[in-house]
C-alpha cells in the first residue's frame, strides 16, 4: 500500500493522545493527582487528537461531507471510529473540565472511566479499520489492534512522563516505568507481527487473479501507460532498500532509543520530551512501514512495467 | 473514421458530441465499434486540430513549424497561380501523393485531369504485394478486395495479420468462427491480438513465409491433397506451357493458332492435353479433361508441359525439412498443417443447393466449398520478397480449391478483375502534355513490357519510378520513393509536392532522419530542392511542420464523404456496397474539407471534367460534384451506385439523381446491392455474374478469369530481360534483376535487405505491428487513446535479451546498419527469439500532435522507422523488385544495453515543435469532457 | 429469486482491442453520474479515471506461450467487501438487481472501499473527488427510450468480438448463466469469498486429430494423372512365389 500521510499522522497523534488520556485516568484512579496536571494533560491529549483529526481530513476528497460518515456504524469500522472519536474527544474535554471545575472525584473518575472505555473503543475501531480487511493479510490479525493500543499507550505514557516531569515531577518516574513496560510490550507485539508477516504466503496469485492455471504468468501491460489510481494508491513506489531502512529506523526509534532515555534515570522534562519525540518519530516510521508492508492483491493486476 | 469505414451513429447534446456508437444496421460493423471510433470525441476536441490555413513565415526554416495564418483566398490564389503555371508547362512537376485516405477516386481524378503522372496513394508502402500478388494470380485479393468466408470455414489460417483494414468485421467473424468450433491457426513471429486467440500459434522467422508456403504446397501435391477438379477447370494448371528453352516463346502458353482467341487482351485459345484422347485440345473443350502432369509434343514439334507439372517440379524440392531450416517452423508442424488443410478441404466439403452456370456453359446444380480459409496481410506483403510469397499463398489456396467458394476466399465487388486488370497507364512520356489530362490512368496493371510507363530508353516517367523496369508491377506507385527521388532530382526535379493525409516526415517514411533533412535541403541557388510543399492535414503533425502551405482539413464528422466503389470497395461478399458520410458538426474554425479544395482548384484551373463548355466551373461544391459527376458524359456511372436515375429508381448505373444524398441519408447512408445467390460464388467463371457485371459496367470484359498458377505475365517480362521478347526490353543494368524476379512460378528468396546484411552482426529481425487502439500516428493527440499507449517498448524474447545482457524494462540500443535508437525493452515470451518488435508509430517529435514537449510519446516513445532505410547498398530502393512494395519488415538489428553514464531518454532526439497558430495553446492540467460543456484547466 | 445482473467475459475471443475501455469512458463521462476526468491529458504520464481496463498477460514460455487479454471492471460481487466498509453508505448494492453503485453525493472520497476491493476495480476521480466504478451502465439498461436491443452496457454494445455478455446470473436460462454453465465460467480470486457476479470464460481450444490413413485414399487425384500408377499385371507378385 502507499503510505497515506494523513492517516499516519492521525493514527499516531490520536494514539498518543489516547494513551496519554489513559495514563491520566490511571493516575487519578490510583492516587491523588493535582488537578492542574490532569487539566493540562487532558488539554494536551485533546490537542493531539485535534491535530490528528485535522490531519485525517486531508485524507478525504470531500471533508465537508465528513458528517455523513457516521451513517454506517452497523457495518463499517470507519463509521464507528467516526462516531467514537468525537465522543471520546468530548469525554477527554469533560475529563479536563471536571478537573478544571474541580468536580467530585468520583464524578471525574466516572467521566474518566467512561472516557477510558471510549478510548479503548476508539483504539479498537482504528485498528479494526485495518484488521478487518481480509485480503490485506499483513493487517488481518489481532496484532494490528494490539499494536495500535500498545503503541498508543506506550507513546501516551511517554508523553505523560514528559508532561509530568514538567508539571508534576513525582509522577514522572512511574510514568516512565509504565512507558518502558508498555513500550516493551508494544515492541514485542510488533516484532511478533513482523515475524508473522514474514511467514505470510499470498493467498492470491496471478493464477487465481486471472483464473489461468499455470506456474508462469507474466503481465505485459496493465492498460494504462501513464499510470492510474491503482498504480498509485496501492504501491509505495520506493526501492526495497528504503523500506528496509525505514524498518530499522522504526525498530530503533519506537523502543530502544526512548527506552534508553526513559530508563536513564533522568527526570528532566527535556530528556523525557526527547524520548517522546524519538518515539513519535519512530511511530511515524512504523506506520509508514505498516502501509508499505501490506501487499494488496489488486497489485497482481498492476505488475507490468507498461 | 479509419479505413475500416464502419457505420456510426453520432449523438449530440446541446450541439456537442455526446456519444458515438456503431450503427447496428450497418452491414460492415453491425453495431460494434472499435477503441478509436469510441474516442472520436477526443479527436474532435483535440488541441492538435489545425483550424486556419498557414503559410511558412518568410525566412523561417522548413521543419521549424514557424507559421503565419492566412486566408483561404490567399491560399487558393497561391495554389492556383503555382499550379496553373506548372500545368501549362510541365505537368509532371506537380506531384500529388495521399496517405491513408478514402478519397482516391477524387484525388486520382484530380491528378489525371491536371495531367500529372505523379500521383499515388499509400498502397505502395502499404501492401501492394498483397494486391498484386493475388490479383495477378486469382484476380482478387485480401485487403479491401476480398476476404475469408469465416461463416462457413472450418479451418482458418491467418498469416501476418495484426489488425487489418476490415478490422471490426474480421473481429466479428473470428469470434463467431471460434464459437462455432472452427479451428484457427495463426502464423506470425509475434502472438498478440488475433493470434492471441488462435488455437495454434506457429511462430515463424520474418520474411520466410514464402518457404513455408512452398513446403505446404509441395506436400499437398506430393500427397495428392489438391482439388484436382478445381485445378483442372478453374486454373491454368492444365494449360500447356511451351518448354523450348532458347525459343522466344519459351514459357508462354501454347495456343491454337487456328482458333479465334476472342478478345486479344484475354485470349481463349490455349491448349490442354486431353487425358481421354491423349492429344491437344483447346482448353475447356466440352468432354475433355486436361492432364496435369506430363511432357508432350505438339503436332508442330513444340515441346509443352502442363503448367501444373511445372509447378510440381518447382515445389518438389521444397520439402518441409528444407523449409524448417529457413523458417524455424518444425518440419513436423508443416506436414501436419499441410495434411490438415488438405484433409479438411477434401473431407468436409460444403454443398450449397445453388444452381449456376459457368462461362463455358456447363450447368452446376450446387456450389461446392472446401472450407479452408486463409487471411494474410502486411506480415507477408511488407517484405521485399512479398510478391512471390503472396503469389505462393494464392496458389496454395487455389490448389485447395477455395477461391470464391463458400468457406474459402471470397471476392468483394468490383472484384474479381481480369488478370491483369485492364486499367492501364500511358506507356510513354508523350502521355504527359501541358494543359491536358493524362492520357491514361496514373496507376494501372501492366500485362506485358508494352504497358510500362517508360521512355524510349526504358527509363521511368514517374517521379517514383513506378511502372519502370525497376518495379514493373508497381500497381500502387511507390510513395516511399517520392521525397528521396525528388530531392535527388532522379529522374527529374519537381516543383510542387502536395501531400494529403500522410505523415511522410515521420512514420510513413523510411530513413526518417535523412528524409527530414532532404525536405529542408537547398540547391546551390538557395532554392529548396523540393521547391514547394503543400500539406493538407487535420492535425499538427511532424509533416505539417515542413509545409510551405498548410491546408486545415475538417474531420470525418464535419464533412461529406463517399466510400465509393471507384475507390477501395466496402462491398460485402454477397454484393457491391457503398456508403456516404454526412456532416453532423459544422467545420471547426476555418477548416475546409479537402474535397472542396480540390473541386475549387479543379474549377479554377479549368480541368475539362470540372468545367462547363464555356469554361465556367461546373460544380458548386463537393456534394454537387458527387451527384452530377459521371465517369464519362452519359455513362451513368458515378461515385455512388445507389439511388441513381432521375428519381433514384435505378442502381449501379443511371442518370444523376439530384436527391441522391437525401436518399442515402434516409437509408442509413448505405447502399447495398445483394446479388442473387447464383451470382455470388465462383465469380471468376460464373457466366450469370459476368453478364450482370458487364451490364452494370462493373467490368468491361466477360472472359472467365482463370487462376494463374503459372504466370505468363511474369514470363513476358522475363523474356524481355533475356532479350527474347519482341518488344520492349529493360536497360542492361536491370536485365538480370528482371530475369531473376519475374519468375512465372512461385519461388523463395531471402528479402533483399537480408541478402545485403551481415546476419551475424545483425542477428535479429525488427518489425512493428499496429496497436488496435491507435491509427498510425493520428491518435496520440487523443486524450483517451494515448492513455493506453503513451509510449512503447521494444519487445524481446528473454533468451535474446539475456544473450545481449539486457534486463527487463531496461534502456537499450537497437541498431541496424542504417541507424540506431535508444529505447526501453520489455521481455516477452510471445515473440520468436530471432525477432524484436514494437507498436507502430507511438513515438512522436516533441511538441507535435498538441502534446507537451515532455509527453511520454516524445520522451519514452520511439519510432522504428529511424532504423529502416529506403535505399539498399547499390542504390536500389528497399522495395520488392516486382511491385516496389516497401520492405518495412526486412530490417535486421542488434541490441545492446545502454552504458552506465548514458542518458535514459529516447535517441535520436528531435527539436521541439511550437504550437501552430490556430491550434489550441497551453497545456491543460486536467480535462473532463461532458457533452455540452467542457471542464478542466 | 432476486436478480443479479453481471457481465460474462469470454477470454476465448477477446482480442484486447480496448473498444470496451473507451466506449465505457465515452458513455460515462457525459453520463448521469458525472464526468471521468483526465490529468495531464496532453502532457507527461497522462492518467484518468476509467471504469474498465484491458490488460495483457503472457502464460508459459516460448513457443508454448498464450497471450491473454484480460478486461476488468467492477465484478459486482454478490458479497461485496467494498460495501460494508463504506462509512457513508455511498457504496451500496442494489437489492433489485445486484448492481454495486456509488452515490457520488454521499461519497466523501475516503478511498476505504477501494482498499477493501481485492480486484482494484474502483478508481477515485481526482477532480470530482469521489470514488467511481463501473455502474453496469444503469443509465442505459433501463432506459425506455432506447430500443430493447440497445438496453445493454456501452461496452457490450461496442465489443467487436461479442466477448462481453450481459444478463442475470441468477436466472439459469439467461445467456450469461448458460455461458457460465456450458463454457466453464469462473470467478476471479474465489479465495476471498466475494462471489463476483461477473464471470470469465476460459480459452477453449479446437484441435484436429488426423488419422494417418486419411492420407491414403482411393480417390487420390495423383492416380488420375497416372502419378500413382497401377503396376502392370506382369510385375512380380506374391502369386509367383507361393500357393496356399
Ligand atoms: N488499429 C489500427 N488498425 C489499422 C491500422 C492502424 O494503424 N491501426 N492501419 C491500417 C493499415 S494502413 C493497414 S496497411 C492495415 C495493416 O494491417 P496488418 O497487416 O494486420 O498490420 P501490421 O501491423 O503491419 O501487421 C503485420 C503482422 O505481421 C506480422 N509479421 C511481420 N513480419 C512477418 C512475417 O514475415 N511473417 C508473418 N507470418 N508475419 C509477419 C507482425 O507480427 C504483425 O502481426 O491495418 C489497418 N488497420
Ligand atoms: N515502421 C513502420 N512504418 C510504417 C508502417 C509499419 O507497419 N511500420 N506501415 C506503413 C503503412 S501500411 C501505412 S498505410 C503508412 C501510413 O502512413 P500515413 O498514410 O502517412 O498515415 P499517418 O502517419 O497516420 O498520417 C496520416 C495523416 O493524416 C492526418 N489525418 C487524420 N485524419 C485526417 C483527416 O480527416 N483529414 C486530413 N487531411 N488529414 C487527416 C493525420 O493527422 C496524419 O498526419 O505507414 C507506413 N509506415
Ligand atoms: S475500425 Fe475504423 S471505421 Fe471502424 S469504428 Fe474503428 S475507427 Fe471507425
Ligand atoms: S471490446 Fe471485447 S474484444 Fe475488445 S478488449 Fe474489450 S472485451 Fe476484449
Ligand atoms: S469488484 Fe470490487 S468494487 Fe466491485 S463489488 Fe467487488 S469488491 Fe466491490
Ligand atoms: S470513498 Fe466514498 S464510497 Fe468509498 S468508502 Fe469512502 S465514502 Fe464510501
Ligand atoms: S458496464 Fe458500463 S460502466 Fe461498466 S464497464 Fe461496461 S460500459 Fe463501463
Ligand atoms: Mo497501410
Image: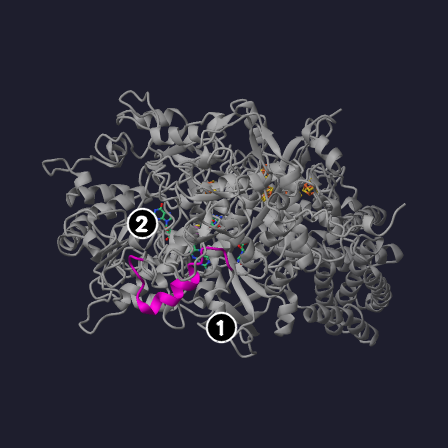
Q: Is the shortest distance between ligand 1 and the CB of mark 1 under 8 Å?
A: no
Instruction: Establish whether labels 1 and 2 are both on one chain.
Output: yes
Dot 2: within a 10 Å radius of its alpha carbon, few (fewer than 14), some, or many (20 or more) residues?
A: many
- Is B291 placed above or below A303 here? above
Q: Position of residue C166 (x, y in %)?
A: 64, 32
Residue B259 versus residue B532 in the image, above or below: above
Subunit bearing disc 2 = B
Give x and y (percent) for residue B337. 65, 50
Counting residues from the start of the chain, the first of labels 1 and 2 encountered is: 2
In this rendered view, identify the residue nearer to me: B758 or C117.
B758
Percent coordinates x, y for residue C108 in the rendering: 61, 43
- The residue that label 1 is drawn on is B757
Image position of B7 (left or right of A186): left
Residue wearing tag 2: B443
**Which x, y percent locates residue B452?**
30, 55
Would you identify the image quadrant in which residue B818 lies?
bottom left
Q: Which residues are magenta?
A: B726-747
Mark 1 near mark 2, Cβ–Cβ under 8 Å? no
User: The residue tagged with tag 2: helix, strand or loop?
Assistant: loop
Left-right relation of B894 to B138 = right
Amino acid at each position: 500500500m502507499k503510505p497515506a500521510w494523513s492517516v499516519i499522522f492521525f493514527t499516531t497523534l490520536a494514539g498518543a493522545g489516547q494513551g496519554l488520556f489513559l495514563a491520566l485516568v490511571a493516575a487519578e484512579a490510583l492516587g491523588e493527582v493535582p488537578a492542574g496536571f490532569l487539566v493540562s494533560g487532558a488539554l494536551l491529549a485533546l490537542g493531539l487528537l485535534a491535530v490528528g483529526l485535522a490531519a485525517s481530513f486531508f485524507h478525504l476528497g470531500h471533508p465537508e461531507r465528513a458528517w455523513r460518515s457516521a451513517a454506517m456504524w452497523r457495518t463499517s469500522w470507519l463509521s464507528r471510529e467516526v462516531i467514537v472519536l468525537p465522543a471520546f474527544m468530548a469525554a477527554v474535554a469533560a475529563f479536563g473540565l471536571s478537573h478544571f471545575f474541580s468536580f467530585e472525584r468520583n464524578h471525574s473518575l466516572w467521566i474518566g472511566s467512561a472516557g477510558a472505555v471510549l478510548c479503548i473503543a476508539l483504539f479498537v475501531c482504528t485498528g479494526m479499520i485495518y484488521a478487518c480487511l481480509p485480503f490485506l493479510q499483513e493487517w488481518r490479525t489481532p496484532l494490528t489492534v494490539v499494536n495500535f493500543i500498545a503503541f498508543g499507550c506506550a507513546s501516551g505514557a511517554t508523553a505523560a512522563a514528559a508532561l509530568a516531569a514538567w508539571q508534576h515531577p513525582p509522577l514522572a518516574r512511574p510514568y516512565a516505568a509504565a512507558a518502558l513496560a508498555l513500550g516493551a510490550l508494544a515492541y514485542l507485539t510488533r516484532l511478533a507481527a513482523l515475524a508473522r508477516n514474514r511467514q505470510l504466503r499470498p493467498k492470491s496469485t496471478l493464477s487465481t487473479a486471472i483464473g489461468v492455471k499455470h506456474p508462469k504468468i507474466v503481465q505485459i501491460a496493465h492498460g494504462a501507460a501513464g499510470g492510474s489510481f491503482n498504480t498509485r494508491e496501492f504501491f509505495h513506489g520506493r526501492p526495497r532498500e528504503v523500506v528496509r531502512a525505514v524498518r530499522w529506523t522504526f525498530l530503533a526509534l519506537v523502543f530502544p532509543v526512548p527506552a534508553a532515555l526513559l530508563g536513564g534515570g533522568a527526570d528532566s522534562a527535556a530528556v523525557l520530551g526527547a524520548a517522546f519525540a524519538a518515539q513519535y518519530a519512530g511511530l511515524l516510521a512504523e506506520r509508514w512501514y505498516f502501509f508499505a508492508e501490506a501487499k494488496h492483491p489488486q497489485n497482481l493486476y498492476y505488475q507490468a512495467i507498461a | 473514421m479509419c479505413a475500416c469505414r464502419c457505420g456510426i451513429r453520432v449523438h449530440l447534446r446541446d450541439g456537442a458530441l455526446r456519444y458515438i456508437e456503431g450503427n447496428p444496421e450497418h452491414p460492415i460493423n453491425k453495431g460494434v465499434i472499435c477503441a478509436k471510433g469510441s474516442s472520436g470525441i477526443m479527436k474532435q476536441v483535440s488541441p492538435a486540430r489545425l483550424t486556419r490555413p498557414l503559410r511558412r513565415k518568410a525566412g523561417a526554416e522548413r521543419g521549424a513549424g514557424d507559421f503565419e495564418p492566412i486566408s483561404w483566398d490567399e491560399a487558393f490564389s497561391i495554389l492556383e497561380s503555382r499550379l496553373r503555371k506548372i500545368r501549362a508547362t510541365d505537368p509532371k512537376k506537380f506531384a500529388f501523393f495521399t496517405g491513408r485516405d478514402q478519397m482516391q477516386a477524387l484525388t486520382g481524378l484530380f491528378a489525371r485531369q491536371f495531367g500529372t503522372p505523379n500521383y499515388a496513394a499509400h498502397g505502395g508502402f502499404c501492401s501492394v504485394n498483397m494486391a498484386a500478388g493475388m490479383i495477378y494470380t486469382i484476380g482478387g485479393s485480401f485487403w479491401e478486395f476480398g476476404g475469408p468466408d469465416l461463416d462457413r470455414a472450418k479451418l482458418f489460417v491467418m498469416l501476418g495479420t495484426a489488425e487489418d483494414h476490415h478490422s471490426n468485421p474480421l473481429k466479428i467473424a473470428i469470434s463467431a468462427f471460434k464459437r462455432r468450433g472452427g479451428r484457427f491457426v495463426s502464423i506470425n513471429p509475434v502472438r498478440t491480438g488475433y493470434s492471441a486467440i488462435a488455437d495454434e500459434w506457429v511462430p515463424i522467422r520474418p520474411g520466410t513465409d514464402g518457404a513455408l508456403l512452398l513446403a505446404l504446397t509441395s506436400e499437398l501435391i506430393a500427397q495428392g491433397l489438391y482439388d484436382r477438379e478445381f485445378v483442372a477447370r478453374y486454373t491454368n494448371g492444365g494449360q500447356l506451357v511451351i518448354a523450348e528453352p532458347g525459343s522466344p516463346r519459351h514459357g508462354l502458353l501454347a495456343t491454337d493458332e487456328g482458333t479465334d482467341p476472342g478478345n486479344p487482351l484475354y485470349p481463349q485459345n490455349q491448349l490442354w492435353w486431353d487425358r481421354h484422347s491423349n492429344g491437344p485440345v483447346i482448353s475447356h473443350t466440352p468432354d475433355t479433361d486436361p492432364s496435369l502432369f506430363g511432357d508432350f509434343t505438339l503436332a508442330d514439334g513444340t515441346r509443352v508441359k502442363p503448367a501444373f507439372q511445372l509447378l510440381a517440379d518447382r515445389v518438389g524440392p521444397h520439402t518441409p525439412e528444407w523449409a524448417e531450416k529457413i523458417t524455424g517452423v518444425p518440419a513436423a508442424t508443416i506436414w501436419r498443417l499441410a495434411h490438415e488443410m488438405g484433409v479438411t478441404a477434401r473431407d468436409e466439403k460444403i454443398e450449397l443447393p445453388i444452381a449456376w452456370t459457368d462461362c463455358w456453359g456447363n450447368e452446376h446444380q450446387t456450389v461446392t466449398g472446401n472450407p479452408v480459409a486463409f487471411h494474410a496481410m502486411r506480415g507477408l506483403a511488407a517484405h521485399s520478397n512479398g510478391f512471390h510469397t503472396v503469389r505462393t499463398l494464392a496458389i496454395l489456396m487455389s490448389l485447395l480449391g477455395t477461391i470464391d467458394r463458400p468457406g474459402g476466399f471470397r471476392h468483394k465487388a468490383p472484384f474479381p478483375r481480369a488478370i491483369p486488370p485492364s486499367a492501364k497507364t500511358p506507356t510513354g512520356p508523350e502521355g504527359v502534355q501541358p494543359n491536358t489530362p493524362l492520357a491514361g490512368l496514373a496507376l494501372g496493371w501492366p500485362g506485358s513490357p508494352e504497358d510500362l510507363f517508360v521512355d524510349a530508353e526504358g527509363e521511368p516517367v514517374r517521379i517514383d519510378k513506378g511502372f519502370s523496369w525497376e518495379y514493373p508491377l508497381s500497381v500502387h506507385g511507390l510513395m516511399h520513393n517520392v521525397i528521396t527521388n525528388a530531392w535527388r532530382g532522379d529522374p527529374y526535379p519537381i516543383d510542387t509536392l502536395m501531400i494529403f493525409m500522410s505523415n511522410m516526415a515521420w512514420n510513413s517514411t523510411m530513413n526518417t532522419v535523412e528524409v527530414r533533412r532532404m525536405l529542408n535541403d537547398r540547391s546551390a541557388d538557395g532554392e529548396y530542392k523540393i521547391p514547394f510543399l503543400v500539406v493538407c492535414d487535420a492535425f499538427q503533425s511532424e509533416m505539417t511542420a515542413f509545409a510551405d502551405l498548410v491546408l486545415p482539413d475538417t474531420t470525418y464528422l464535419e464533412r461529406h464523404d463517399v466510400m465509393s466503389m471507384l475507390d477501395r470497395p466496402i462491398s460485402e461478399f454477397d454484393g457491391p456496397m457503398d456508403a456516404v458520410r454526412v456532416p453532423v458538426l459544422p467545420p471547426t474554425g476555418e477548416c475546409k474539407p479537402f474535397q472542396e479544395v480540390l473541386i475549387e482548384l479543379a474549377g479554377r484551373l479549368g480541368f475539362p471534367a470540372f468545367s462547363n463548355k464555356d469554361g465556367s466551373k461546373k460544380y458548386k461544391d463537393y456534394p454537387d460534384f458527387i451527384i452530377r459527376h459521371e465517369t464519362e458524359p452519359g455513362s451513368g456511372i458515378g461515385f455512388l451506385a445507389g439511388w441513381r436515375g432521375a428519381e433514384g429508381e435505378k442502381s449501379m448505373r443511371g442518370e444523376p439523381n439530384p436527391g441522391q444524398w437525401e436518399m442515402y441519408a434516409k437509408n442509413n447512408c448505405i447502399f447495398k446491392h445483394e446479388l442473387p445467390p447464383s451470382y455470388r460464388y465462383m465469380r471468376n467463371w460464373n457466366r450469370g455474374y459476368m453478364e450482370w457485371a458487364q451490364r452494370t459496367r462493373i467490368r468491361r470484359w466477360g472472359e472467365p478469369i482463370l487462376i494463374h498458377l503459372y504466370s505468363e505475365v511474369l514470363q513476358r517480362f522475363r523474356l524481355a530481360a533475356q532479350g527474347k521478347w519482341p518488344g520492349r526490353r529493360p536497360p542492361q543494368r536491370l536485365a538480370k534483376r528482371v530475369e531473376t524476379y519475374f519468375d512465372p512460378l512461385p519461388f523463395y528468396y531471402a528479402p533483399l535487405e537480408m541478402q545485403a546484411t551481415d546476419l551475424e552482426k545483425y542477428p535479429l529481425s525488427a518489425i512493428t505491428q499496429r496497436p488496435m487502439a491507435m491509427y498510425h500516428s493520428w491518435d496520440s493527440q487523443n486524450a483517451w487513446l494515448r492513455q493506453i499507449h503513451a509510449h512503447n517498448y521494444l519487445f524481446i524474447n528473454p533468451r535474446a535479451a539475456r544473450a545481449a545482457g539486457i534486463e527487463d524494462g531496461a534502456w537499450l540500443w537497437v541498431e541496424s546498419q542504417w541507424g540506431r535508437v535508444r529505447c526501453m525493452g520489455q521481455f516477452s515470451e510471445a515473440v520468436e527469439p530471432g525477432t524484436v518488435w514494437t507498436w507502430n508509430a507511438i513515438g512522436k517529435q516533441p511538441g507535435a500532435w498538441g502534446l507537451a514537449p515532455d509527453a511520454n510519446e516524445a520522451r519514452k516513445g520511439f519510432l522504428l522507422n529511424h532504423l529502416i532505410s529506403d535505399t539498399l547498398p547499390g542504390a536500389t530502393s528497399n522495395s520488392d523488385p516486382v511491385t516496389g512494395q516497401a520492405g518495412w519488415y526486412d530490417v535486421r538489428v542488434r541490441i545492446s544495453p545502454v552504458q552506465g553514464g548514458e542518458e535514459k531518454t529516447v535517441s535520436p532526439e528531435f527539436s521541439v515543435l511550437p504550437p501552430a497558430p490556430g491550434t489550441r495553446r497551453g497545456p491543460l492540467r486536467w480535462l473532463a469532457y461532458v457533452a455540452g460543456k467542457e471542464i478542466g484547466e | 429469486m432476486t436478480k443479479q445482473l453481471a457481465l460474462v467475459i469470454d477470454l476465448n475471443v477477446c482480442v484486447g482491442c480496448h473498444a470496451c475501455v473507451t466506449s465505457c469512458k465515452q458513455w460515462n463521462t457525459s453520463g448521469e453520474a458525472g464526468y471521468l476526468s483526465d490529468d495531464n491529458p496532453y502532457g507527461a504520464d497522462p492518467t484518468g479515471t476509467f471504469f474498465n481496463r484491458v490488460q495483457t498477460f503472457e502464460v508459459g514460455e516460448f513457443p508454448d506461450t498464450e497471450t491473454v487479454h484480460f478486461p476488468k471492471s467492477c465484478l459486482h460481487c454478490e458479497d461485496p467487501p467494498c460495501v460494508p466498509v463504506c462509512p457513508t453508505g455511498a457504496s451500496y448494492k442494489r437489492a433489485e438487481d445486484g448492481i454495486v453503485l456509488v452515490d457520488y453525493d454521499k461519497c466523501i472520497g475516503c478511498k476505504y472501499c477501494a482498499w477493501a476491493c481485492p480486484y482494484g476495480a474502483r478508481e477515485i476521480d481526482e477532480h470530482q473527488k469521489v470514488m467511481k466504478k463501473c455502474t453496469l451502465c444503469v443509465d442505459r439498461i433501463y432506459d425506455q427510450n432506447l430500443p430493447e436491443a440497445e438496453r445493454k452496457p456501452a461496452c457490450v454494445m461496442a465489443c467487436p468480438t461479442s466477448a462481453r455478455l450481459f444478463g442475470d446470473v441468477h436466472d439459469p436460462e439467461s445467456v450469461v448463466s448458460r455461458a457460465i454453465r456450458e463454457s466453464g465460467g469462473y470467478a476471479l480470486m474465489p479465495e476471498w469469498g466475494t462471489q463476483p457476479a461477473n464471470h470469465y470464460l476460459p480459452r477453449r481450444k479446437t484441435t484436429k486429430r488426423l488419422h494417418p490413413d486419411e492420407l491414403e485414399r482411393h480417390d487420390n487425384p495423383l492416380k488420375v494423372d497416372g502419378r500413382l500408377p497401377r503396376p502392370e499385371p506382369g510385375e512380380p507378385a506374391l502369386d509367383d512365389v507361393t500357393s496356399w
